[in-house]
Amino acid sequence: MSDGKGSIAAGMAICWLLNVAQLGVGWLLLVADVRMLPAYYVLTGAIGLAQVGYMVPIWRLLRRKGKPRTARGLAIAAFCTFALDLIFVTLASLRH
């Protein structure tokens, strides 16, 4: 977009790339030491909740910098991640 308002697709890409990075850190914790297993479960099993720690500041920064569309894309992708995580955790808990 050339109007300086940002792009929804860019916001979604930012969110999902950061989620992939979070999963990578979780994987590194898993292979590093068995004592890091609880941190692995939090980073991967609760990705929808854990992403709040870095999505909210980025969302606020984008809004302040005049990129409302990018911030909206970030929020949409974060909500999708949260919803999918909630569905996954619910289905996993119903299986046991």
Image: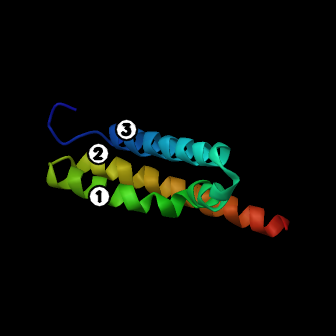
Of 5 and 86, which appears nearest the observer?
Answer: 86
- Quarter assignment of residue 90: bottom right
- Quarter assignment of residue 85: bottom right
Q: Secondary structure at mark 2?
A: helix
- Quarter assignment of residue 95: bottom right
Number of marks present in the image shown: 3
Q: Mark 3 or mark 1: which comes first in sequence? A: 3
The residue where tag 1 is placed is: 57
Q: Secondary structure at mark 3?
A: helix
Residue name at image x 34 percent, y 37 percent: 10
**Picture layout, residue 28 above or below residue 43:** above
Q: Secondary structure at mark 1?
A: helix
Task: Say which mark, if any, is on residue 9.
Answer: 3
Which residue is situated farthest in the right direction here? 96
- Amino acid of disc 2: Thr
Disc 3, disc 1: CB below 8 Å? no
Residue name at image x 55 percent, y 41 percent: 24
**Within 10 Å of the Cα at label 2, are there few (<14), some (14-19), or many (20+) other Cα atoms?**
many
Of 46 and 13, which appears nearest the observer?
Answer: 46
Which quadrant is the N terminus positioned in?
Answer: top left
* Position of residue 64 in the picture relative to residue 74 (left or right): left
Which quadrant is the C terminus positioned in?
Answer: bottom right
- Amino acid of disc 1: Pro
- Amino acid of disc 3: Ala
**Within 10 Å of the Cα at label 3, are there few (<14), some (14-19), or many (20+) other Cα atoms?**
some
Q: CA distance from mark 2 to mark 1?
A: 13 Å
Q: Mark 3 or mark 2: which comes first in sequence? A: 3
Question: Depth-wise, is mark 2 or mark 1 nearer the camera?
Answer: 1
Question: Depth-wise, is mark 3 or mark 1 nearer the camera?
Answer: 1
Residue name at image x 41 percent, y 46 percent: 15
Task: Say which mark, if any, is on residue 70.
Answer: 2
Q: Position of residue 37 (x, y in %)?
A: 67, 57
